[in-house]
Amino acid sequence: MHRFLIIKGMTMLKRIGLLVVTAAVLTGCASGDETALDQPATTETQPESSFTTGSGSEYGEAEARRLERQRAAEAAAAEAERRAGQALLEERTIYFEFDSAELGSKARDIIRAHADYLVANPGTRIRLEGHTDERGTREYNIALGERRAKSVERAMMLRGVAKNQISVISYGEENPVALGSNEDAWAKNRRVVIQYR
């Protein structure tokens, strides 16, 4: 019986010892976790953070370069448009087909450039001089020259030019720029001349 008590006592000690060891292990794990939570991030997480920052920076630089290229392209397009407009302003003659007061696409480009200039400079005045070739009667050609000048006037006014900035006159066939009775001379004489005053 005494021996049974000793064995039972040892078993009890083993159990207590096992409980003490288990408690110590659990306590150590818990304090280890707390320590791990209190510690700052290790250097292993730094490369990811650096990569993100670098990537954002690279994206920002790429976007800045793209915007710079876009601004340069827009500036070049604006300069090309300005030069084209300036070249059209230097053209002061609008040509017409035989017996017509209809405006062609080239004529419309010239009119647009002059109209835009006149709108931007409301104190500027012009005279539209209508001309024809030598074919037709004097009276018919005076009327045709006027129709041509009025056609240009209407197109300019549609673009915002004030009526008081424009005067119209027709010379008919009286002031040719090319002499001769051939298609080349006639084509040069069928015109409206824009005269700035």
Image: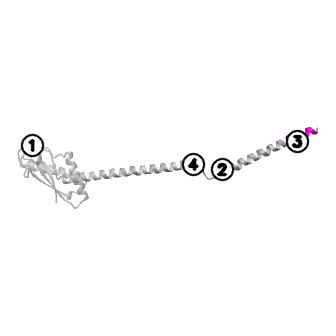
Name the amino acid, label 4: Thr
Q: Which residue is found at the position 17% from the left and 51% from the top?
A: 150
Mark 3–mark 1 Cα distance, whole angstroms, equals 135 Å
The foreground one among 126 and 43 is: 43
Quarter of the image where the N terminus is located: top right
Q: Secondary structure at mark 3?
A: helix
Residue with the mark numbered 4: 45
User: Please, what is the three-letter code of the amino acid marked with disc 1?
Assistant: Glu
Residue 154 highlighted magenta (yes or no): no
Q: CA distance from mark 4 to mark 1?
A: 85 Å
Task: Categorize mark 4 by other alpha carbons within 10 Å: few (<14), some (14-19), many (20+).
Answer: few
* Cβ–Cβ under 8 Å for marks 4 and 3: no
Q: Residue at x 88, y 39 (%)?
A: 8
Nearer to us in this view, 135 or 8: 8
**On the image, numbered disc 1 is attached to which residue?**
183
Name the foreground residue: 68 vs 27: 27
Asked if disc 3 and disc 1 are in contact, CB closer than 8 Å, the reply is no
For the question of whether residue 193 can be seen, the reply is yes
Instruction: Check whether the beta carbons of the residues at disc 1 and disc 2 lie within 8 A of each other.
Output: no
Q: Which residue is mark 2?
A: 36
